[in-house]
Amino acid sequence: LSGLNELYEIPCKTKGISCSISTGLVDLVIAADEAQLKQVFINLVKNAIEALEGVESPIIKISVKRILHQIAIEIHNNGPSIPPDILEKIFVPFYSTKAEGSGIGLSLSRQIISNHGGQIVVDSDEGKGTTFKVILPVVD
């Protein structure tokens, strides 16, 4: 998780998005393919940045928490919520609401996290924004 900062700092500065990361964790080990996880986080941050297009005072908050034998990485943005009918479809391969979107990003991200014994969940509420939570097992 050492590379999380570099994934969002430059894009956020370029787009004027207020970004913060809170880890509060030291020496946490997960067994994972670093390149694949990086791909997942690049996709989630990219989606968060795109969701903030035209939002006044855009914010992305990344937090890392340990929950028993798991680690939860949350990527929150204060953009518009995802409507419930679309929320049901966002992990379906080739489904996209973007004109240029392939519909591969979230589907592939979910598959990668699943292959690592984890899961991705999403919470989207009107007026609060959207949070993607990646949950992975910790190696003790």
Image (cartoon, grey):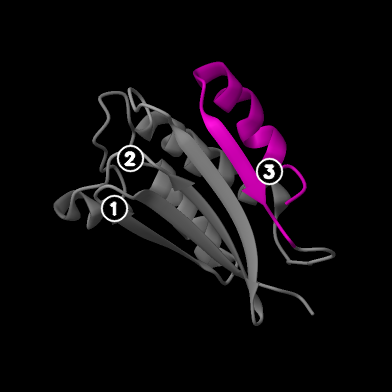
Please rate how many residues cluster around mark 1, counting C-alpha atoms within 10 Å: few if below 14, some from 14 to 19, many from 20: some
Whole-percent x, y for residue 138 in the image: 70, 73
Q: Secondary structure at mark 1?
A: loop
Q: Going 24% across and 53% down the picture, which residue do you hit?
A: 87
Whole-percent x, y for residue 9 in the image: 65, 30
Q: Is the residue 57 above or below the residue 86 in the image? A: above
Pointer 2: what residue? Answer: 103
Give the residues in magenta: 1-24
Whole-percent x, y for residue 56 in the image: 36, 26
Q: Is the residue 121 above or below the residue 55 in the image? A: below
Spatial CA span between label 2 and label 1: 7 Å
Please rate how many residues cluster around mark 2, counting C-alpha atoms within 10 Å: few if below 14, some from 14 to 19, many from 20: some
**132 relative position to 53: left or right:** right
Q: Is the residue 85 above or below the residue 114 in the image? A: above
Q: Residue furthest front?
A: 57
Q: Is residue 138 magenta?
A: no
- Do tag 2 and tag 1 residues touch (Cβ < 8 Å)? yes
Q: Going 79% across and 80% down the picture, which residue do you hit?
A: 140
| Image quadrant assignment for residue 31 | bottom right
Q: Is the residue 62 above or below the residue 113 in the image? A: above
The disc, 2 or 1, on the residue closer to the chain's N-terminal end is 1
Q: Residue furthest right?
A: 27
Pointer 3: what residue? Answer: 4
- Do tag 1 and tag 3 residues touch (Cβ < 8 Å)? no
**22 relative position to 124: left or right:** right
Pointer 1: what residue? Answer: 92
Q: Going 24% across and 50% down the picture, which residue do you hit?
A: 126
Whole-percent x, y for residue 40 in the image: 55, 47
Instruction: Tell which tag, 1 or 3, sits nearer the viewer.
Output: 3
